[in-house]
Image: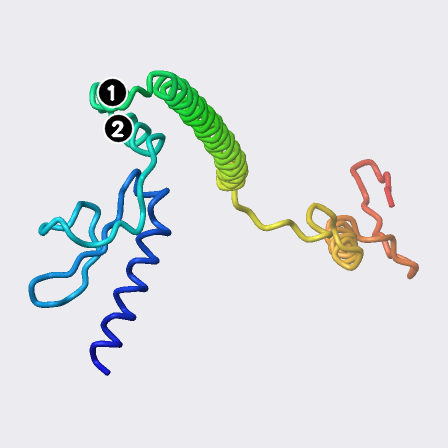
Amino acid sequence: MKTATTGKRLWWIAILLLAMVPAAGAQSIYKCTTRAGQLEYTDHPCRDGKGELIHQADDSEIIDQHLRLGEDAKAKSYADSHHLEALYRQRVAAHQQAMEEKAQHQADEAIVTQQRDEAARQQALADAAANRDRLRAENDALRQQNDEYRAQLAQPLYNAPPAYWGAVPRYWNGHREHDHDRDRDAQHPPPSKEPVFHPCKQFAGGRVQC
């Protein structure tokens, strides 16, 4: 039971390796049996020369693998040893085209990133300018309020005079006029209506004056 489970697990590993071949590059997969009787899957031939090749990397995969790794000399040597000059030229052209497309894609991404960064910078500058304008307007308003407050403090403090300030009340004028008339009457009393007796004086010579 355990052997069957182990074999099934190794089989699934082999399937995963086969699925990863295009991504991992040119790899031949071998099914080998170790000395302990266990199965293993590897990308190189079995040690005892036995085993089973379950995936054979073709020539295009091998050349492409060397080119992707920057091993141009190995790719050329493999092509020459297998008389694959035409295939080599084809794979080199495809590799160069792929590299150019990758470089163009990276350049486009760099331009987009630069444009995005520039837009963000411009937005930051606009926000900073708007913030400065807002602060300047607030400072101007506060400065104007302070000026008005200083002007109010500079004005003299006094109470408003009453409505009758500077005007003589009617009753006061009446008293003053009455007192003035009384003083005048005391100095110059009015003529009496009763008869006044004036005695006569006799001078020398018998002259009399009344």
Residue drawn at x 34%, y 49% as measured from the top left? 20
> Which of the two residues, 127 or 53, is positioned nearer the viewer here?
53
- Quarter of the image with the C terminus in it: top right
Residue 24, image x and y in percent?
30, 43
Q: Secondary structure at mark 2?
A: helix
Name which residue type carries label 2.
His
Q: CA distance from mark 2 to mark 1?
A: 6 Å
Residue drawn at x 26%, y 76% as measured from the top left? 5
Residue drawn at x 19%, y 59% as measured from the top left? 40
Pointer 1 residue:
72
Name which residue type carries label 1.
Asp
Q: Residues within 10 Å of mark 1 (few under 14, many from 20)?
A: some
Q: Is residue 46 visible?
A: yes
Q: Residues within 10 Å of mark 2 (few under 14, many from 20)?
A: some
Count of numbered tags: 2
Residue drawn at x 87%, y 53% as measured from the top left? 191
Residue 62, image x and y in percent?
29, 32
Disc number placed over residue 66 in the picture, else none: 2
User: In the image, 64: left or right of 180?
Assistant: left
Residue 13, image x and y in percent?
28, 61
User: In the image, 167: left or right of 43?
Assistant: right
User: In the image, 165: left or right of 7?
Assistant: right
> Which of the two residues, 140 or 98, is positioned nearer the viewer here?
98
